[in-house]
Image: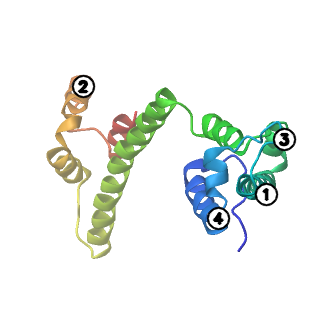
Amino acid sequence: MVPPIFNGEKYNTWVVRMETYLEVLDLWEAVKEGYILPCSLENLTATQLKNHNEKKTSKSKANTYLFTIVSFIIFTCIMSLKSTNVIWDYLKTKYEGDDRIKSMQVMNLVRDFESEFNKEYFERLLNIENKVRLLGYEFKDSRIIEKFLITIPKRFVATISILENINDLSIITLVELLNSLQA
């Protein structure tokens, strides 16, 4: 199995894949716990020493994987970090962001979603119009604009009202309407 390399993009997808990958290798606990090596091993029982050695080995393996699954640029940022959970938390903070950054990302995605609805719906209407015209029938732009304005979701009512005040919707072109709605 080849681990997914992280280059700074699509963190949310990479982190899910990487957690699964580390779980398969039985290293996820080492990353999650961030085992800190004790200063002295003198007073440990045989069981504690064995447990310590297993955790130390897991920590070393997890560090190795975290260092090898990132691009060189990201590696230079994390190479001085010693604890696996510190490395993991650093990557999370830097590439996922805090709640404020996440909410801004959600707002941007919602805005993209809203404008995609317009484009896709508008393109479907244009596609139907072109098919009708290919069959030799006349299909006026005003009919498509009317259909679009009638079926547009309620959240665009304010935008349509503004367009009505600025433009005469009976003479607006399809391109003007689409550009106005996207803006």
Give the CA separation, mark 2 to mark 4: 60 Å
Q: Residue at x 71, y 57 (%)?
A: 47
Label 4 vs 1, first from the N-terminus: 4
The kind of secondary structure element at disc 1 is helix
CB contact under 8 Å: marks 2 and 3: no
Q: Which residue is mark 2?
A: 162
- Of 36 and 175, which appears nearest the observer? 36
- Of 180 and 63, which appears nearest the observer? 63
Q: Which residue is mark 1?
A: 57
Label 3 vs 1, first from the N-terminus: 1
Q: Position of residue 105 (x, y in %)?
A: 48, 36
Label 1 vs 2, first from the N-terminus: 1
For badge 1, the amino acid type reads: Thr
Q: Position of residue 102 (x, y in %)?
A: 48, 35
Splitting the image into 4 quarters, where does residue 155 fall?
Answer: top left
Q: Residues within 10 Å of mark 1 (few under 14, many from 20)?
A: some
Give the CA separation, mark 1 to mark 2: 66 Å
Q: Which residue is mark 3?
A: 79
Label 2 vs 3, first from the N-terminus: 3
Q: Which residue is mark 4?
A: 26
Q: Position of residue 140 (x, y in %)?
A: 23, 55
